[in-house]
Image: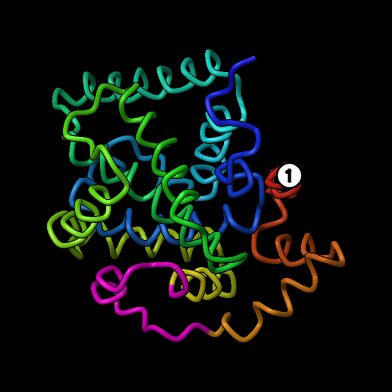
């Protein structure tokens, strides 16, 4: 049976660990808030209305791609394309290709960065694996202007950071929603997690600060994972209403 992502790929390891996914969400939630196309998320209303629900639905779609056999993964990608096409028809406008690319670029960047923060540095070959998987997703979605190599992606990623991000009223409102839905303590944890993974440009625009209070406790957290007690911290980070979803974050 052919899979969209090979069984021994590091991409499966990255997306099979709940803590890595939470850091991917932390970074993406910061960058989403700055993206100049964030108004599309407000048009649907899904992200500001339910940031955590958006997290778990995104995880579900990603896993339908990462862990599925090839044809099932392609159907999942086509479903994502159809959902966005329907939103475009409702609004009477097209989501720009650069906005789609930005999302793919975020998935590549935060997959690599989050794994390296929690696990180890990836080799160039492993980084290319991550790039290849999400680039193939973009190709299936018929996106224009995709990079052809990891090196080209790095250059385009830097251009995106400087051209497609800006702090706006949407940024401020999204952070208000994050705080509302997470509560003060969990919101503060989100900010500390963002400091660990976001690139310098995002940090500058948001004024997060480079030192994270989570840095000194990462070693302790890794020990808890060895002892299989990390579920306790995950439960503390996310509200009890998502208890089942929290358990399902780990598949490896």
The number of callouts visible is 1
Q: Position of residue 30 (x, y in %)?
A: 37, 62
Q: Which residue, given by chain and number where applicable, does mark 1 sit on?
A: 252
Instruction: Give the answer, above or below, for where 21 lies relative to 233.
Output: above
- Where are the magenta residues, as a range? 195-212
Residue at (80%, 70%) from the top-left corner?
224
Q: Is residue 64 left or right of residue 240?
A: left
Instruction: Give the answer, above or below, for where 92 lies relative to 51.
Output: above
Q: Is residue 181 left or right of residue 153?
A: right
Rendered-image quadrant of the C terminus:
top right
218 or 86, nearer to the observer: 218
Residue 20, magenta (yes or no): no
Instruction: Give the answer, above or below, for where 63 lies relative to 226.
Output: above
Q: Is residue 44 left or right of residue 143?
A: right
Rendered-image quadrant of the N terminus:
top right
Q: Position of residue 65 (x, y in %)?
A: 53, 28
């Amino acid at each position: 049976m052919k899979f969209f992502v090979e069984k021994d790929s590091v991409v499966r390891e990255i997306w099979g660990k709940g803590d890595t996914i939470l850091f991917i969400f932390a970074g993406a939630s910061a960058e989403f808030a700055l993206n100049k196309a964030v108004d599309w998320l407000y048009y649907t209303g899904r992200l500001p209305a339910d940031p955590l629900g958006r997290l778990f639905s995104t995880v579900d779609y990603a896993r339908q791609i990462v862990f599925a056999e090839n044809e099932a993964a392609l159907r999942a990608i086509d479903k994502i394309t159809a959902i966005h096409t329907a939103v475009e028809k409702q609004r009477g406008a097209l989501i720009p290709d650069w906005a789609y690319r930005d999302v793919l670029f975020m998935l590549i960047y935060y997959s690599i960065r989050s794994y390296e923060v929690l696990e180890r540095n990836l080799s160039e070959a492993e980084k290319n694996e991550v790039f290849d998987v999400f680039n193939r997703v973009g190709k299936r979605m018929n996106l224009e202007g995709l990079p052809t190599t990891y090196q080209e992606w790095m250059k385009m990623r830097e251009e995106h950071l400087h051209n497609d991000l800006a702090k706006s009223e949407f940024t401020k409102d999204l952070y208000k929603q994050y705080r509302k839905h997470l509560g003060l303590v969990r919101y503060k944890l989100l900010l500390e997690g963002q400091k660990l993974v976001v690139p310098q440009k995002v940090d500058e625009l948001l004024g997060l600060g480079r030192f994270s209070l989570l840095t000194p406790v990462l070693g302790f957290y890794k020990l808890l994972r060895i002892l299989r007690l990390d579920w306790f911290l995950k439960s503390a980070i996310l509200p009890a209403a998502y208890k089942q979803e929290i358990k399902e974050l780990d598949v490896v």
